[in-house]
Amino acid sequence: MVIISCFPRTEAQLREIVALLKAAGLFDQYNEQAHGESVLLSVHTRTFEEREKVKDILEQTGIVELMYSDETAA
């Protein structure tokens, strides 16, 4: 499982991303975590198709810096 994370710049941008994730059927695969004044949005992806979908959504909403982590790595 690969986790794609980002820091949305505004609350409106975060809400737009969440709405698009839900519309794409990924409503149970993301979480939000406060980091000081910012919110870290992390999306858990299981397949290549999900990763591409998430990357497209984030690019569409203006996110350019993505962080990746592999939850299956030992």
Image: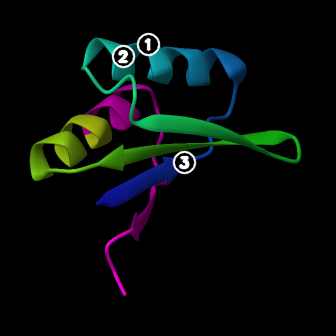
> For this view, does 64 lie left or right of residue 25?
right
Q: Residue at x 57, y 16 (%)?
A: 15
Q: Say which amino acid is labelled 3.
A: Cys
Residue wearing tag 1 = 19
Secondary structure at numbered mark 3: strand
66 within the magenta span: yes
Tell which circle, 3 or 2, labels the residue nearer the N-terminal end.
3
Q: Residue at x 34, y 81 (%)?
A: 73
If the image is split into quadrants, where does the C terminus sit?
A: bottom left
Cα gap from disc 3 to disc 2, whole angstroms: 17 Å
Cα gap from disc 1 to disc 3, whole angstroms: 16 Å
Q: Which mark is residue 6?
A: 3
Coloured how? rainbow
67 within the magenta span: yes
Q: Is residue 21 above or below residue 65?
A: above
Residue wearing tag 2 = 22
Chain part drawn in magenta: 56-74
Q: Say which amino acid is labelled 2.
A: Lys
Mark 2 Cα-neighbour bin, 10 Å: few <14, some 14–19, many ≥20: some
